[in-house]
Image: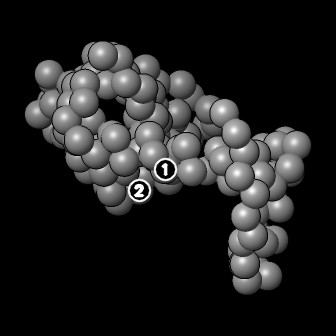
Amino acid sequence: MSVVRFGVSLENDLLEALDEYVQSNMFPNRSQAIRNLIEKNIVEKKWKCNNIVAGAIILTYNFNKSDIQIKLSEIKRNAVNEVLSIQNFYISDEKILEIIAVKGPSNKLTELSDKLIAIKGIEHGKLIMSKID
């Protein structure tokens, strides 16, 4: 595959963010980081269709807030066809790292993760998917 060179103009704050991204991900240069970001964007666009994918929804939250557990359970119960397994890890005296293994149409998994992450009290959430067909 041949490589094409082109110029890119960025504001200082975007350039600083790109350099931080390069450093924190240990890319050898900016070009590799930009290539990675473009490829990631292409993959994420493909996920917005109905491809069957497998993945994980990762959540962190304070387990002492009982309403979080109730809301999480209700949403997961309504997604029995997509949820394969759930594992909880106590990462501190008050915090849980929850990993939900999922499989199904990418748009349904995205919708599921958005619902879970939007629950008040969820401190961090992320969906990771991989095409399986």
3 sits left or right of 85 in the view: right
Element class at badge 1: helix
The quadrant holding residue 3 is top right
Quadrant the C terminus occupies? top left
Quadrant the N terminus occupies? top right
114 sits left or right of 122 in the view: left
Q: Is residue 115 above or below residue 132?
A: below
- Of pointers 1 and 2, the one earlier in the residue sequence: 1
Between 21 and 61, the one lying in front of the other is 21
Per the image, the residue denoted by label 2 is: 121
Q: Position of residue 36 (x, y in %)?
A: 65, 44
Residue count near mark 2 (Cα–Cα under 10 Å), binned few <14, some 14–19, many ≥20: some
Residue count near mark 1 (Cα–Cα under 10 Å), binned few <14, some 14–19, many ≥20: few
Q: Can residue 96 be seen at all in this image of the molecule?
A: yes
Per the image, the residue denoted by label 1 is: 41
14 sits left or right of 95 in the view: right
Frontmost of labels 1 and 2 is 1
Q: Amino acid at mark 1?
A: Asn
Between 68 and 30, the one lying in front of the other is 30
